[in-house]
């Protein structure tokens, strides 16, 4: 493992977890002896870290860091009123973003809901808001910081709200992968494409190497753009970090074969691939996945068809190739919402995406039968770290003039990541989908 790169933090997107970082630095670069910091609050008392989760873990990780500070007790019956009062006191100064996968107790305070990219753009379109409170996960707050106006400050209510998929592609691993492509003689014809669900450091790598960001809504257009950079069939794509979105898009929408795809495993030398296998591939898929969507199976699709007569199965493209192949419809969270809204009364749906969203869709459409594809699949654990106590703490601190849990992407990283985001924004728009299509 290239420890020189890890310690150099060449592409690290550093957040302003200053207290944490200082403690980490004091504990040693490998973090193995990290002890959570004990910040001093304005009242002069010493508070304890809120979470024990992740002690000793890597602070550049998307998840598993400590979140210093004191929380109101979850049992406080006034939490809803406290959040309401703090939000009212802040007025237009604060803009609260709620990802579709957030809990109800949090989403009720969101000024706008959406997927990660829509929310980041919504925040940038509200320059009167000095503070963006992002109820989502860490990479989303990073993207909001990159796209926001310079005076806007982005806060993540719980610093331990990361994304396991984003954590599966680390900057030093991706640099090693690129070296493998150079050694195989194919780096020059390879365009990196990274899913929005990646750290700012990986977006920066992508921007620096001529690539772009994609979402689950525009992955097809992004891949076509990437292959077009090297016409005549010579082009290759390195797709980060979700192998399933990459494979599903390449095979189902671009017409590549499964044999055109290889999976690069960052935990194995040379990704577990020979130079010839890399040269033969069109799509080099990073071995990452979503820990929620990766749990759905084709057997569950078959079972729900048995259980619910006439059901249509609608899944997110982060599900495996076998699952999306067995489903009736496949699309992003926004697509899933539009599809259900447009569906006729009396229709039956089994949905394979995060449970909070599916439950809210079922409540909003009582005239349709809406079931979760598989009852044993859990909520996204890190998304669910954002709860009412964390939101109240964040808002009440702002009322007192304190900014807690601010996310700041280091300027050089932000500039390179912005390049990759801007290439995505320049992709041709498709007409809005009004009729569900498979
Ligand atoms: S649902 Fe999956 S991709 Fe989304 S934040 Fe959770 S782990 Fe990451």
Image: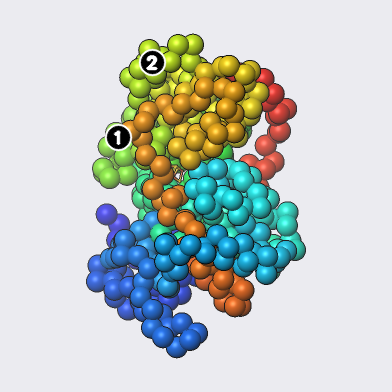
Q: Residues within 10 Å of mark 2 (few under 14, many from 20)?
A: few
Q: How many marks?
A: 2
| Residue lying at 63% horizontally and 18% vertically, measured from the top left | 344
Q: Secondary structure at mark 1?
A: loop
Residue 11 locus on image (x, y percent): 46, 59
| Residue lying at 45% horizontally and 37% vertically, measured from the top left | 355
Q: Secondary structure at mark 2?
A: helix
Q: Nearer the viewer, residue 279 or 121?
A: 121
Residue 255 locus on image (x, y percent): 51, 18
Q: Nearer the viewer, residue 161 or 4?
A: 161
Residue at the limit of the structure toward the right, as seen here = 128
Residue at the limit of the structure toward the bottom, as seen here = 44
On the picture, is 352 further left or further right than 64? right
Q: In this orientation, does residue 308 appear?
A: yes
Up the image or down, 241 lies above or below 253; here it is: below
Residue 353 locus on image (x, y percent): 46, 33
Up the image or down, 151 lies above or below 213; here it is: below
Q: Which residue is mark 1?
A: 273
| Residue lying at 72% horizontally and 63% vertically, measured from the top left | 92
Q: Which residue is mark 2?
A: 307
Colour scheme of the picture: rainbow
In three-dimensional space, the C-alpha distance between marks 1 and 2, rounded to whole angstroms, equals 42 Å
User: Quadrant of the image for the C terminus?
Assistant: top right
CB under 8 Å between discs 1 and 2: no
Residue 216 sits in quarter: top right
| Residue lying at 33% horizontally and 19% vertically, measured from the top left | 299
Up the image or down, 325 lies above or below 377; here it is: above
On the picture, is 374 further left or further right than 313? left
Up the image or down, 436 lies above or below 309; here it is: below
User: Quadrant of the image for the N terminus?
Assistant: bottom left
């Amino acid at each position: 493992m290239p420890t020189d790169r890890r310690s150099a933090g060449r592409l690290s997107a550093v957040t302003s977890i200053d207290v944490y970082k200082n403690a980490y630095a004091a504990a040693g670069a490998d973090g193995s002896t990290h002890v959570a910091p004990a910040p001093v609050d304005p009242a002069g008392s010493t508070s304890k870290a809120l979470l024990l989760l992740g002690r000793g873990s890597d602070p550049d990780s998307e998840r598993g860091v400590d979140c210093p500070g004191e929380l109101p007790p979850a049992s406080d019956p006034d939490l809803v009123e406290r959040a309401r009062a703090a939000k009212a006191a802040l007025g237009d100064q604060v803009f609260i973003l709620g990802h579709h996968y957030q809990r109800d107790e949090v989403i009720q305070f969101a000024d706008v809901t959406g997927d990660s990219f829509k929310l980041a753009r919504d925040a940038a379109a509200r320059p009167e808001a000095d503070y963006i409170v992002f109820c989502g996960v860490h990479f989303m707050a990073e993207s909001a910081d990159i796209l926001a106006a310079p005076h806007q400050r982005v806060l993540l209510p719980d610093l331990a709200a990361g994304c396991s998929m984003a954590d599966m592609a680390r900057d030093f691993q991706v640099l090693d992968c690129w070296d493998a492509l150079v050694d195989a003689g194919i780096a020059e014809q390879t365009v990196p494409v990274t899913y929005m669900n990646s750290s700012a450091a990986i977006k920066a790598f992508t921007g620096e190497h001529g690539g772009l960001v994609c979402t689950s809504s525009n992955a097809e257009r992004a891949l076509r753009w990437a292959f077009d950079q090297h016409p005549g069939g010579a082009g290759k794509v390195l797709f980060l970090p979700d192998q399933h979105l990459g494979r599903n898009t390449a095979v189902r929408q671009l017409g590549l074969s499964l044999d055109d795809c290889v999976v690069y495993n960052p935990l194995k030398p040379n990704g577990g691939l020979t130079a010839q296998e890399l040269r033969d591939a069109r799509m080099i898929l990073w071995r990452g996945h979503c820990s929620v969507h990766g749990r759905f199976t084709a057997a569950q699709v078959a079972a729900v068809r048995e259980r619910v007569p006439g059901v249509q199965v609608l899944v997110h493209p982060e599900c495996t190739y076998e699952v999306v192949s067995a489903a009736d419809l496949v699309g992003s969270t926004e697509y899933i919402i539009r599809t259900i809204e447009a569906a006729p009364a009396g229709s039956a749906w089994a949905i394979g995406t995060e449970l909070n969203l599916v439950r809210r869709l079922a409540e909003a459409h009582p005239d349709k039968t809406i079931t979760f594809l598989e009852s044993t699949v859990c909520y996204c654990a890190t998304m669910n770290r954002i709860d009412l106590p964390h939101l109240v703490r964040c808002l009440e601190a702002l009322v007192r003039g304190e900014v807690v849990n601010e996310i700041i992407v280091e300027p050089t990283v932000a500039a390179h990541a912005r390049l990759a985001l801007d290439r995505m924004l320049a992709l041709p728009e498709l007409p809005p989908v009004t009729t569900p299509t498979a």
